[in-house]
Amino acid sequence: QVQVLESGGGLVQAGGSLRLSCAASGRNFRINSMGWYRQAPGRQRELVATITSGGSTNYAESVKGRFTISRDNAKTAVYLQMNSLKPEDTAVYYCNVLGNDWGIGRPFVSWGPGTQVTVSS
């Protein structure tokens, strides 16, 4: 089983920055992509940004030019640098990991428990 854990959320004023981190751990797995999703109160969970094992990135239109997704060289951690934050960015941010679990012989999808980001106006 692949475990995922986020860190780095908090309270920041509009225009400020935060950096989220996510680490995947376990045995006998290969990650195909990692990404960040967010869910605000009363709204559905939405994609923020993803990065594949090949380094291709994808961003929601609402965060393009403000957020940057990156990963570590071992490709088991992913980061989200969030600049020029707006109150509408307030949400719980979840890390998502897609890959193959060689131990059970099938693909997996793992989510972290989430980290709260609050942007005050």
Image: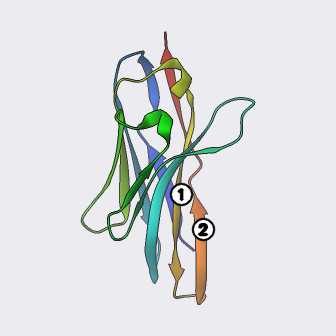
| Most distant residue in the left direction | 73
In the rendering, at what x and y percent does residue 68 appear? 33, 43
Total numbered labels placed on residues in the image? 2
Badge 2 density bin: few <14, some 14–19, many ≥20, Cα 10 Å: some
Query: Which of the image's four quarters has the N terminus?
Result: bottom right
Seen at 28% across and 69% down, the residue is 74
Seen at 43% across and 43% down, the residue is 7
Dot 1 falls on a residue whose secondary structure is: strand
Dot 2 falls on a residue whose secondary structure is: strand
Image quadrant where residue 67 sits? top left
Residue topped by disc 2: 109
Q: Is residue 9 left or right of residue 88?
A: left
In the rendering, at what x and y percent does residue 84 appear? 36, 23
Seen at 33% across and 70% down, the residue is 54
Q: Is residue 61 left or right of residue 64?
A: right
Q: Is residue 14 above or below residue 50?
A: above
Q: Is residue 47 above or below residue 99?
A: above
Of residues 23 and 69, which is closer to you in this image? 69
In the rendering, at what x and y percent does residue 104 appear? 60, 87
The tag on residue 18 is none
Badge 1 density bin: few <14, some 14–19, many ≥20, Cα 10 Å: many
Gap in angstroms between the C-alphas marked 2 and 1: 7 Å
Residue topped by disc 1: 96
Seen at 49% across and 34% down, the residue is 62
Q: Amino acid at mark 2?
A: Val
Of residues 61 and 35, which is closer to you in this image? 61
Q: Amino acid at mark 1?
A: Asn
| Most distant residue in the right direction | 42
